[in-house]
Amino acid sequence: MIRPTLTLLALLLSAAAAAQPGALDRLRALQANPAASKAAAEQGRQAAFFCVNCHGEDGNSQIPEVPSLAGQNPAYLIEQMRKFGAGERRDPFMQGLIKVLKDEERAQIALYYAAGRPQANKANATLAAQGRSRFEKSCATCHGPRGRGNDAELIPRIAGQKPAYLESSITRYRNRSGERNDPRMTAVTANLAKDEIVALANYLASLD
């Protein structure tokens, strides 16, 4: 009787886990309650104690190749945490860090960074002017006319990121290197030349 009992217990635990709301569901519930959302964002500051080493104290990265998270769409942040945890987005350090975070902590961190104020980034004005037409042609449909993304559709804010980070991200999509995977981005970036990527990155960095 022991083995059937253990099997039944395992099934019940699996069903209970599946029924529990995930981080995105928790985020949406918090967003529906302004007071709870504010409190969660404040708790997120503590939950993000390790994130600040790379992403900055206030979510504005000081490392050229590391993205700023201040002002980022929270649902997108939740989705990226999920991808790191599931191995769908590859980075050994991030994958290990994300796996230890509970859904509640992920929602808190996402709200904390979303509430931050993005800092302006330096961009080459000449290159930015060249990149504008490429952005309007290839990026604005999904990321919006100012590059601020769409939280409901898990599309990130790309305005105001550092040029070096933008260049590396776009190049990884184009080269299908495996660190980042998104069929839409792979298709859009497939035919971009290096100079187009550099110009596009500078234009995006110039946006607020």
Image (tube, grey):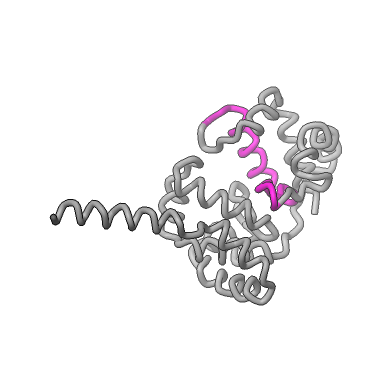
Q: Quadrant of the C terminus?
A: bottom right
Residue 27 at what x, y percent from top left? 60, 62
Seen from this angle, which residue lies furthest left? 1
Looking at the picture, tell me which residue is in the foreground, 86 or 16.
16
Residue at the image position 55 percent from the left and 38 percent from the top: 180
Residue 182, compared with residue 65, is above or below; it is above
Residue 16 in the figure: left or right of residue 70: left
Count of numbered circles in the view: 0
Residue 82 in the figure: left or right of residue 118: left
Residue 172, compared with residue 165, is above or below; it is above
In magenta segment, residue 155 = yes
Looking at the picture, tell me which residue is in the foreground, 135 or 40.
40
Residue at the image position 66 percent from the left and 25 percent from the top: 190
State whether residue 83 appears in this view. Answer: yes
Residue 130 at what x, y percent from top left? 84, 34
Residue 13 in the figure: left or right of residue 183: left
Q: Quadrant of residue 183 in the image?
A: top right
Q: Quadrant of the N terminus?
A: bottom left
Seen from this angle, which residue lies furthest front? 1
Q: Which residues are magenta?
A: 151-177
Looking at the picture, tell me which residue is in the foreground, 149 or 6.
6
Residue 85 at what x, y percent from top left? 45, 49
State whether residue 112 appears in this view. Answer: no
Residue at the image position 83 percent from the left and 36 percent from the top: 136
Residue 22 at what x, y percent from top left? 51, 57
Residue at the image position 69 percent from the left and 51 percent from the top: 152
In magenta segment, residue 116 = no
